[in-house]
Image (cartoon, rainbow, N blue to C red):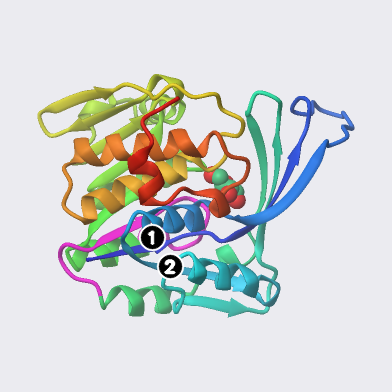
Amino acid sequence: MTIFNLGSINADHVYCVPHLPGPGETLAATSMQTGLGGKGANMSVAAARAGSHVVQIGAVGRDGLWAKNRLLEYGVDTRHIAELDVPTGHAIITVDDVGENAITLFSGANHQISEDSIARVLSSGSTGDIFVTQNETNAQVIAAKIGSKLGLRICYAAAPFDANAVKAMLPYLDFLILNSVEAQQLETALDVSIEELEVADIVITLGAKGARWVGREIDQSFDAIKVDPIDTTGAGDTFTGYVLAGLDRGLTMGQSISLAMRAAALMVMRMGTADVIPDLKEVEEFSGL
Ligand code: RIB
């Protein structure tokens, strides 16, 4: 089957710093690297590395052709990534000594994706295919609506979090993934508990505490794998990509989450984003430190 991903593509500029800078502070980075990122691209690479056929729907500027090529090299179907006369999206990422990060985004081409082209690509999808999106592009709701009509399983990774954006997506969702802070924010914004949401499957990532799956008549916790993190950036995206790839190849939700937790644990021990997402063999061989 196919995973269609309406998602962002960024150049990630990653700066290692002793601590995250405060307001008005000037701080010297100890190192700097640029690589492929964007929550969308990271999820696509993760799912492709986990063995799925992934179609990325997105856009880059002429300065971002390298990013499109790199996605292709990582096994992602890039034929529906538009090349536009606007700058490619980018992210300024600072990572501190304990692996925490702060990210500033510039959307660029990620907010210029044509709704017509989304409709055209999704029309090749059918029941059993998965549609996933995040909150770094335009047109998520219209795409989810189209995908839902076609019988695709609609998944939304609610990041960067915006309660109104989640609210608009809720009627179409089969699967929602968010972290514990976002789950609390959503409960407050909607004045309902997560268990009351009309979404078949909800997965809440809990960082070092693991993950929780709230499904129909199930509420299951998963223990975290103990690792020494150096950079948590992109770990959540890797988790999502691996969960979807697991479901895509017929694993149960529990099996998919367990596999995804191993992928995310490996990811936090690496500096960088899409370029360092582990492949399925590495993940299957890894069981913690
Ligand atoms: O989740 C990590 C990602 O967020 C980075 O790759 C960055 O580009 C931003 O989109």
Pick the residue in front: 175 or 45: 45
Question: Which residue has dot 1 on it?
Answer: 48
Residue at x-position 64% and y-position 71% = 66
Pick the residue in front: 245 or 202: 245
Count of numbered tags: 2
- Magenta residues span 125-141
Residue at x-position 56% and y-position 63% = 111
Identify whether 53 is placed above or below 285: below
Q: Is residue 81 left or right of residue 262?
A: right
Q: Amino acid at mark 2?
A: Val
Q: Is residue 211 left or right of residue 276?
A: left
Give residue 41's position: percent from left, percent from top. Answer: 50, 58
Contact, CB < 8 Å: mark 2 with mark 1? yes
Q: Amino acid at mark 1?
A: Ala
Question: Which residue has dot 2 on it?
Answer: 76
Give residue 190's position: percent from left, percent from top. Answer: 35, 31
